[in-house]
Image (cartoon, helix red, strand yellow):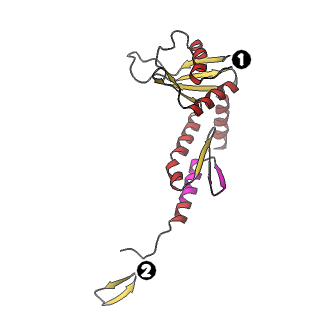
Amino acid sequence: MHLRSKLTDLEDRSRRNNIRLMGLPEGMEGTDLTSFLRDTLPKLTDTTFNPPLEFERVHRLGPKRQDGKGRPRSIIACLLRHGQARQLLQTARAQGPPKLGSTEIRLSADFSKETVDRRRAFLSLRSRLRHLDMKFGLFEPARMWITKNGDLRTFFDPEDLRTFLDKLQEQAHPMETNTLPIQDIRAGVTRPTHGAY
């Protein structure tokens, strides 16, 4: 498990300069995807980059569909400068998904499959956290912090957080014991019970 965690960390580090773009219609970029993104991303995010954006590589994921139907393939863009990748993601997060005409384009960091799965597992617990009136957030790549009444905790494993929430809910709603008397018709006596009938 420790080795797998180290390998996942190394893979995530190797993707630090990557951004993932989703929703850009196929063919909108023309014949030069790199030049298209260099010109379009600053306009999409209303951000000026100095020096201009530079990319190590840019490509769409997977083979192109021959029928042209279905969702457009996602784009992976590896920027030369990590700071510019972070700036794009932070701006998109603060402003909301940018639009190219009427098309909404989503930008996100590029994580390994293991990290994506952990993030999804953490996010699946949001409703329980809200129910318990907790503030929470997700650090990159996949750490969730929670706080209530000034008590701050950080979790690296979604199962640890799930177990923690289970214990909190057990403490907040312990099983109530029924001690009301029940009439025993056969014996003609009244006796207490400690279980639900």
Residue 85 in the image: state x and y as whole percent: 65, 26
Under mark 1, the amino acid is: Pro
Farthest residue toward the left? Answer: 186
Of the numbered discs in the image, which one, if any, rests on residue 51? 1
The quadrant of the image that shows the C terminus is bottom left
Circle 2 — which element? loop
x, y percentage for residue 136? 59, 48
The image position of residue 116, as x and y in percent, is 56, 37
Task: Name the quadrant of the N terminus.
Answer: top right
Q: Residue at x 56, y 34 (%)?
A: 113
Residue 174 in view:
yes
Secondary structure, mark 1, is loop
Q: Is residue 186 above or below residue 113?
A: below
Which callout, 1 or 2, points to the residue nearer the camera?
A: 1
Tell whether position 116 is magenta. no
Name the quadrant containing residue 82.
Answer: top right
- The numbered disc on residue 179 is 2
Question: Where does the magenta region start and end?
Answer: 146-167
Give the residue displayed 61% in from the left and 29% down from the top.
91
Q: Nearer the viewer, residue 14 or 138?
A: 138
The mark nearer the N terminus, 1 or 2, is: 1
Q: Is residue 146 left or right of residue 50?
A: left
Cβ–Cβ below 8 Å for labels 1 and 2?
A: no
Residue farthest toward the top in the current orientation of the protein: 31
Name which residue type carries label 2.
Thr
Horizontal side, residue 194 vs residue 132: left or right: left
